[in-house]
Amino acid sequence: MIYDFNQHVDLTGFGSVKQEATSRIFGESDLLPLWVADMDFQGPQEVIEALRRRVDSGIYGYSMRTEAMDEAVIGWMDRRHGWRIQKEWLCHSPGVVTALAACVQSFTAEGDAIVIQPPVYPPFSKVVTENGRKLVTNPLRLTDGRYEMDLEDLEAKIEANGAKMLILCSPHNPVGRVWSEEELAAVIAICRRHGVMIISDEIHADLALPSSRHTVLAKLMNEDERFVICMAPSKTFNMAGLQSSFIIIPNEEIRKAFTAYMERLHIGGANAMALTAAEAAYRHGDEWLDQALRYIAGNMDYLMDYVAAHMPELEVVRPEGTYLVWMDFRAYGLSPVQLSDWMTKTAKVALNAGYHFGAEGEGFMRLNAAAPRAVLAEALQRIREALPGMPAPAEAEVKAEA
């Protein structure tokens, strides 16, 4: 089946955050919403048909993970990532962020230091600080338009703070890095030396773009080591609203502790529609995903070419994975708040402000490129046409000081 990713789907009346809450959240009307990290694409036809069959049953009672569901996940991991997992390693969580918080609570104590690598997905810092742990940052380094890990700083921070855990974002949101085996192996070696547990958020694992290949962290580790892999169908197949993820924990002791914590919170139950959709996606979604990745890669090419031709002062970090684009507006000299205001009030485009991803994100904006190309083109045109209305750097500095 050939999928049409150029069509616009009207979600009015369905409570879509992107289509119905953007004006309220950003305080402006007539915005193009390229912020929240879900796609504008309809999912695989097999998923739609499976959900219709489930809805047509007319009964939506308590549901559980089935043997067929587990087999679908196992097959997907083997087929797409070359990692043969065992059924008993699988745990369920309503979402990856829920699982991150559960890991923080289960495997660290109040006051323990936990390392993250900003600029990074905002909930990473929140699951640390809101659970009474000490936040330690190991900022990524931007070198020649590409982000790299500062491994020397990572080890120094772990030693200085006695860190107990590293929360890894792989592939990385928002900078779009797909970490190489060599980079991951170096991180693992540091954590081994210091007894640091690794929680690897790999929710974007399936979204490595055609020129890159994702390596599951666990493939470089022993099954009895202290790590947790967090994945989900939500980003891969555009079903974030169904609230489902799977957590892979080979170490039995760690798995039992994680499961016990989830059971104490009584949140281990499964959503009937999510189970149906996930099984269908993992069994039949390969062709849809391959087409979606090619389309997204085409959007990335379009964006890079447009910026180079029409906005040369704007630096764009070309992503190796995810459908998110990290855009560097620092050359224009605006404060972070002014940049956000200009983007919404003048350009009329809703993007994520970079400073939400940490101080390292000041002067950046995150754009979601998983949209019909016409929408992406209009957003870029709006930004370009709004540039003459951007305050000059000197004016921006005066306003920032006022």
Image (cartoon, grey):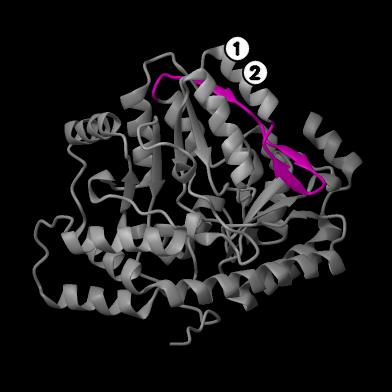
Q: Residue at x 23, y 61 (%)?
A: 69
- Quarter of the image for residue 297 reads bottom right
Residue 263 image offset from top left, x and y in percent? 18, 35
Q: Amino acid at mark 2?
A: Ala
Query: Pointers 1 and 2 in contact (CB under 8 A)?
Result: yes
Q: Is residue 372 left or right of residue 249?
A: right
Give the residues in magenta.
131-150
Under circle 2, the secondary element is helix
| 337 is higher (above) or lower (below) than 329 | above
Question: How many other residues sit within 10 Å of disc 1, few (<14), some (14-19) or many (≥20)?
Answer: few
Look at mark 2 in the image and give the residue it sits on: 156
The reply to whether residue 100 is visible in this rendering is yes
User: Is 22 covered by the magenta stretch?
Assistant: no
Residue 392 image offset from top left, x and y in percent? 89, 47
Q: Amino acid at mark 1?
A: Ala
Q: Which of the labelled discs sits on residue 53, or is there none?
A: none
Quadrant for the C terminus, please. Answer: top right
In the picture as drawn, the residue positioned furthest to the front comes out as 222
Q: Residue at x 37, y 63 (%)?
A: 76
Question: How many other residues sit within 10 Å of disc 2, few (<14), some (14-19) or many (≥20)?
Answer: few
Residue 161 image offset from top left, x and y in percent? 55, 13
Residue 104 image offset from top left, x and y in percent? 38, 27
Look at mark 1 in the image and give the residue it sits on: 160
Q: Is residue 397 left or right of residue 233?
A: right
User: Is 139 covered by the magenta stretch?
Assistant: yes
Q: Residue at x 49, y 33 (%)?
A: 167
Q: Is residue 344 left or right of residue 24?
A: right
